[in-house]
Amino acid sequence: MDPLSIAASVAGLLAAAGKVTSVLSTVKSSIGNAPQSMNQLISQTKELEVIFFAVNDFISRTGSASRSRISMIQVEQLVATLAEAVLTFSELEALANRFGIYTEMSMLKRMRFIWKEEAIASIILRLDRQKCSLSLMLNIVQWFVHS
């Protein structure tokens, strides 16, 4: 996968993260007692958004970076992690979009109807893995540059 395709994936992930964070934050603010998992999901999404910006910055500077610096991250590992993130965010977007479908119900009833703790726990775990993988890749590159 070329840097342009990776950059497009990261741009899509940035858009998805922003959308999901916005929807979940709106729902959270409109109900009094949001599940703790919603707070975790919002937090994970915001943290990943920061990492996606850093990955995007790294990709945009690969043309001017040294070969030894770029070789510290295996492209296949980056692509695999981003592909997994795309799948996770697709699932997360579908979940977030379900909040807007049930307009006749009150927000609290929608939350009870839609919010599935088991599915959310799985998404949070995957987001955390992706966050750790991308952070580690960026830390390796940053360490190599500063050492």
Image (cartoon, grey):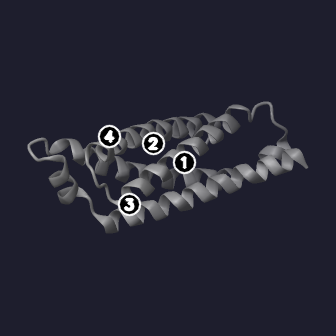
Q: Distance between the residues labelled 1 and 2?
A: 8 Å
Q: Report the disc number at residue 17.
A: 2
Q: Distance between the residues labelled 2 and 4?
A: 14 Å
The 10 Å Cα crowd at callout 1, few under 14, some 14 to 19, many 20 or more, is many
Q: What residue type is labelled 3?
A: Gln
Q: What residue type is labelled 4?
A: Thr
Determine which residue is flagged by label 3: 36
Mark 1 or mark 4, earlier in chain: 4
Mark nearer the viewer, 3 or 2: 3
Q: Report the disc number at residue 48.
A: 1
Label 1 close to label 2 by CB (< 8 Å): yes
Q: How far apart are marks 3 and 2 (CA)?
A: 19 Å
Q: Is residue 76 visible?
A: no
Q: What residue type is labelled 1?
A: Leu
Q: Distance between the residues labelled 3 and 4?
A: 15 Å
The 10 Å Cα crowd at callout 4, few under 14, some 14 to 19, many 20 or more, is few
Mark 3 or mark 4, earlier in chain: 4
Q: In which quarter of the image is the N terminus?
A: top right
Mark 3 or mark 2, earlier in chain: 2
